[in-house]
Amino acid sequence: MTIDRVGDVVLAVLAMRVFGRDAALLLRRAAAAGVRTGVSELLRTDGEGDR
């Protein structure tokens, strides 16, 4: 686990502690949006070689 990942986890835990369930919902939605963006980038074709 890198120091950046540790920082992200600590920040998420603190947000959960301060904001409760609302923070969890926002984090889940942000993660889902990131996954959707990544999948759309993987599936996107630029049209070259698709004949």
Image: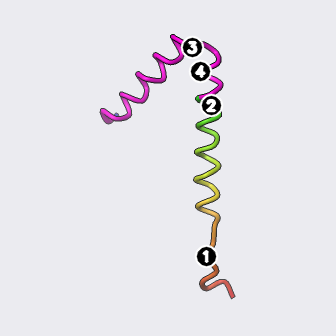
Marks 1,4: beta carbons within 8 A: no
Which region shows up in magenta?
2-26
Mark 3 and mark 4: Cα distance apart in space:
5 Å
Secondary element type, mark 2 = helix
Q: x%, y% of residue 31?
A: 59, 37
Q: Earlier in the sequence, mark 1 or mark 4?
A: 4
Looking at the image, residue 5 sits to the left or right of residue 41; the answer is left
- Amino acid at circle 2: Arg
Which residue matches tag 3? 19
Distance CA(mark 2)–CA(mark 1): 30 Å
- Give the residue type that dot 1 points to: Asp
Asked whether disc 3 touches disc 4, contact meaning CB atoms under 8 Å apart, the reply is yes
Q: Residue at x 61, y 76 (%)?
A: 46
Q: Secondary structure at mark 4?
A: helix
Label 1 belongs to which residue?
46
Tags 2 and 3 touching, CB below 8 Å: no
Q: Position of residue 50 (x, y in %)?
A: 66, 83
Task: Please report the residue visible at 46 percent of the width from the left and 16 percent of the height from the top.
Answer: 14
**Which quadrant of the rendered structure holds the C terminus?**
bottom right
Membership of 25 in magenta stretch? yes
Proximity of marks 3 and 1: CB atoms separated by less than 8 Å = no
> Could you tell me what secondary structure mostly forms the magenta stretch?
helix
Rendered position, 22 above or below 36: above
* Left-right relation of 47 to 2: right
3D distance between C-alphas at marks 2 and 4? 9 Å
Identity of the residue furthest to the left in this view:
3
Q: Which residue is the site of mark 2? A: 28
Q: How far separated are the C-alphas under marks 3 and 1?
A: 42 Å
Residue at which label 4 appears: 23
- Is 45 one of the magenta-colored residues? no
Label whose residue precedes the other's in the sequence (3 or 1) = 3
Q: Quadrant of residue 49?
A: bottom right
